[in-house]
Each structure stands twice: as structure tokens, then as C-alpha cells.
Image (spheres, rainbow, N blue to C red):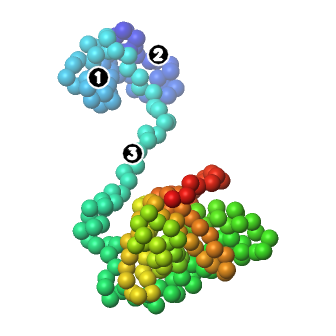
Amino acid sequence: MDHIIYQPLPEKEAKDLGLEIQSHKKSQEFVNAFIKHCIPNVKTLSTGEYMSRKAVVLEYSQEKKKRKQHKAKGITAKERRELKLFTVNPDQQRYHMYLPLHELWKQYIRNLCLGNRASAQPQMIQMKLLKADLHGAIVTVFKSKCPSYVGLTGIILQESKHIFKIITKEDKLKVVPKLNCVFSVEFDGFISYIYGSKLQMRASERSAKKFKSKGSIDL
């Protein structure tokens, strides 16, 4: 192998390229230094021993290495609770403060349901409501396995996977579970009844979910 690696260029080609022909010893030193620079693991072995048992590829690869994308680490649910990010202070538990939010929600739901036209099918509006963001909506607990929740009405302030936080006209913040409850939502004279079991997911996840148009079992 040595006679191939360290074979000097023909004198004619060297002159055409403007190269100076080096001695055999200098050429060997250059090749060894080049291999050690390109292959760090060969530093512990001689180049001859390394190349005798393993092929060395010195071609340039244009494939770019995929960089690992480090996602920004968000805060945990425990840290959110400790920071009290979702706590509504007592001085902010006022029903009239959230009436403008309800007006914004009505504008949003009108645009979502194409103005609630008379020609709109109730089933289409029902499916839109299932995917809609309900923050700011006025809801009433129509049915529930827990009698104390029945008739509770208020504006939805917060929604999580399993509960609604509702502010009532009596300026009281109520936590209502979605499971085992049927909610009625009213806007522009249209009343829709929604089973809480279908809402047991985050609002962001619900907007992309495909709901099956099938009946629900009564409580």
C-alpha cells in the first residue's frame, strides 16, 4: 500500500501544476499528519496499523448534519399552581367586569356560525359550538347528577380539561365539572345543549377534533 500512497507525481505533471516534488520521507510525514488531523481516533495508533484494518474515506460530504432542535422548556403544572397564574383574585370576581368579554364572544361566535342565519342547520351550529372557544360564553347547567349544580348560570372565565370556572351574577366564582353535566349555551335566540363529556379536553385540542354526529346517552 505504501508504494501507492506515497508514489510521487511524474515530473512532467508536477511542472505543469507548478508543484515542487518532495522527497519520499517528506511525503510520508505529510500524509501521516493529514490522516491524524482528519481522524482523531488514529492518534493512539500508527496510521499504517489503522489503515491496514479499516478503510478511510477522505471525500468531502455535502450532507449537512441535522442539528438537534432544543425546545424551550415550559413551566410545569406544579409551578403554575405555585405562581398562581390561573387564580382569580377576590377583587376581580365581579360579574359586570366580564360583560365586555361576553360581547366579544358573541361577535366571535356569530362569525364562526356565519351570522346564525335562518337557513343554517342546527346540527352545523352544534358542531361549531363543540369546537368553539367558550371563554366569555354565558352557560347554564341544564342537567347534572349533582343537584346543587342545576340552574347555575354565569360567564365562563377559565376552562381546563375537566372543569369550567364560572362567575355568576352574584359575583361568586364556581368550579363546575364537565363530566355528568349538560350545559345550555344561548346566543341570538338560539339555545344549544352540550354534553360535558364531549368537552373533556383542552380548548386548543377540541378545535382540531372531529366529532362524530351521533346521539348522546341522557344522564
Three-letter residue code for mark 3: Lys
- Occupied quadrant, residue 216: bottom right
The crowd level at tag 3 (other Cα within 10 Å; few <14, some 14-19, many 20+) is few
| Residue tagged 2 | 10
Instruction: Establish if 178 lies above or below 6.
Output: below
Q: Secondary structure at mark 3?
A: loop
| Residue tagged 1 | 32
Residue at image position (52%, 71%) is: 142
Mark on residue 131? none
- Occupied quadrant, residue 8: top left
| Residue tagged 3 | 68
Q: Secondary structure at mark 2?
A: loop
Q: Split into 4 quadrants, where in the image is the N terminus?
A: top left
- Between disc 3 and disc 2, the foreground one is 3
Q: Secondary structure at mark 1?
A: helix
Q: Are the residues flagged by discs 3 and 2 in contact, CB closer than 8 Å?
A: no
